[in-house]
Structures are given as C-alpha cells and as structure tokens.
Image: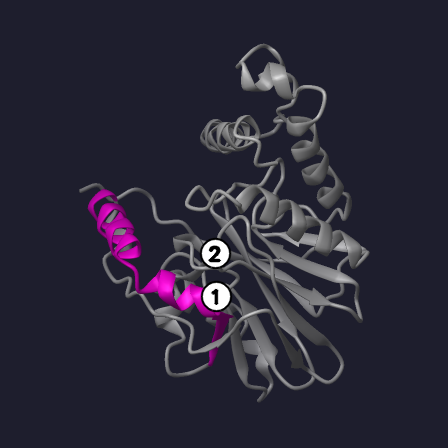
Amino acid sequence: MTSPARPEVHRHLLPGVDPRIFALRVADEVDAFVVRTERFVALVDTLATPELCARALELIADETGGRPLLVVNTHADWDHVWGNAAVEGRAPIIGHRSAAARVRSAEARDTWRDKRAADDRFDRVRLVAPTVTFDTSLTLDGGDLTLELLHTPGHTPDHIAVWIPQLRVCLAGDAAEDPLPELWEGDASSAAQLVASLELLRSLAPEQVLPSHGGTTDPALLDRNLGYFASLSGRYADAVRAGGPEFETVFPDSSGLSAPALAFYRACHRKAVRAAAAGRL
C-alpha cells in the first residue's frame, strides 16, 4: 500500500460569481461548492475523505453566523460524497433517492476496498448515505436565495444539479464537464438521459455554469457538451463508429489538460463513441 502526497482543499473565489457562492477546490480531483443564504449555508458535496471535508468545514466556519448547515450530494461518486462521515449527525445530507442505494451497494464497497488498498488516505472513509432524499426535484428556500435541486441523470442515475434562479447560476455537478462529460455505462439509456439533462439545464438560460470538474463558469459549456454529443451522432458518426481518423476530430480541445486528465477524458470519449455506435445518441 502506498501513501502518495495528501491532497489539500482550498477556498477558491470564482471571478464574476456572486460572493455568496465559492468553491472548495481539491486540485486535480474535484470542486465542492458553498452557497450562503439568509437561512442556511449549503455545502454542495463533501469531497473524497472525511479529513478533506473536515478541513472544508474549518474553511467555511466564518460563513455560518449561527445559520444551520445543509449538505447536498450531487451524486454518489467517491470524489463527491466520501466525506459525508464528517457531517453525519451535524447536518442533513440531501440527495436523490437512488444515491442512498448507490452508497450502500456492493459496488461502492468494492470501490472503497480498491482505493484503500492503493492509498491509505481512504482508511477512515465510511460510506454514509443521504438522510433526506427525493425523486424529481426539491426546493430549499434560503430567504434571499432559492436552491432548486433537479434530477439530471446520465452521468449517473442519481445525479442532481442545483439551480439558483435569483442569480441565474447552475451548479452542474458532473452533468456538464470541460472538455466533456462521462456517461454511466450501467444503463443503455444514459447517453440520451445525459443529453436531455444538458438540454434541461440549458433551457434555464443560466448566466454562469459551475461544473465540479473543469474550473469554468462559462454558460456556453452546456452548448459545447451538447455539440460534442451531436457531433457523434451527426455527419461524423460513420467514421467515428469505424474508429477512423474522425475519432480524433470530434474529441474536444484538450489543451491544458494534465496527462492523467487527458487519459481520463479519452476513456470518457470512448464510452460516448460506443454509445453512438450502438445508436443510443
């Protein structure tokens, strides 16, 4: 078992974004977000370990001002919710109904065992499920700001995004990513679901889109992601399905990506190509 350098979380202000929203960034891993309202402070995702989440809570201690803490899980992937143990018993954890099942699944336990074997920073992880769940949507009234939690499947079956209408800000989770989102391979309909989710978010006409991966606030990210999927099912489809040179043509701009990130998104691209080849886009 190895002990790589421990990742750290940093409070990250987002240029041009209302200061009531900011990121808690673990470089090369994930962004969580904080939304401060009159009535509560919302922590959107708890990062990959209880230690990272505990540090995040220290970084936002000055935001509470006596207001209660609410936690939102965008989905049950390890980098988003394995910090849940740090807030268990001190804040409600809100997520989609199927997120609770994913956290309790044998697959989640297998993933934890594999990651623990590779890196002892996961030794103290406990798989803690959401304590408040919903199916289609849930509205959190913060007084000055409203958080609308919207089921946006496709990346995973349990995925939700957060829409803040007063600011026209969308916290997209992993439904949108730069350069491209990842499909859920366990469901043949995931590609169509993700396209529908992206179209739903675009229909809200957000002025800022904050994904959990990509470090952007650009609302055009939704158009780029939708354009990417359209390219796979459009005029390049036959060449892509054949694995020809157009496979690279439709891969989004990858300049600036680290080597590990590039390898990851190429794997995501291959998933999308398989979906296109099967006629699921």
Q: Position of residue 199 (x, y in %)?
A: 72, 50
Name the amino acid, label 2. Answer: Val
* Mark 2 neighbour class, 10 Å CA radius: few under 14, some 14 to 19, many 20 or more: many
Contact between marks 1 and 2 (CB within 8 A): the answer is yes
Is-magenta flag for residue 100?
A: yes
* Mark 1 neighbour class, 10 Å CA radius: few under 14, some 14 to 19, many 20 or more: many
Mark 1 or mark 2, earlier in chain: 2
Residue 151 appears in which quarter of the rendering?
A: bottom right
Left or right? Give the position of 159 relative to 77: right
Q: How is the image coloured?
A: one colour
Name the amino acid, label 1. Answer: Ala
Q: Position of residue 220 (x, y in %)?
A: 77, 43
Q: Position of residue 221 (x, y in %)?
A: 72, 43
Left or right? Give the position of 97 relative to 153: left
Residue 208 appears in which quarter of the rendering?
A: bottom right
Disc 1, SS: helix
Count the labels in the image. Answer: 2
Residue 206 in sight = no
Alpha carbons under labels 1 and 2: distance apart: 7 Å
Disc 2, SS: strand
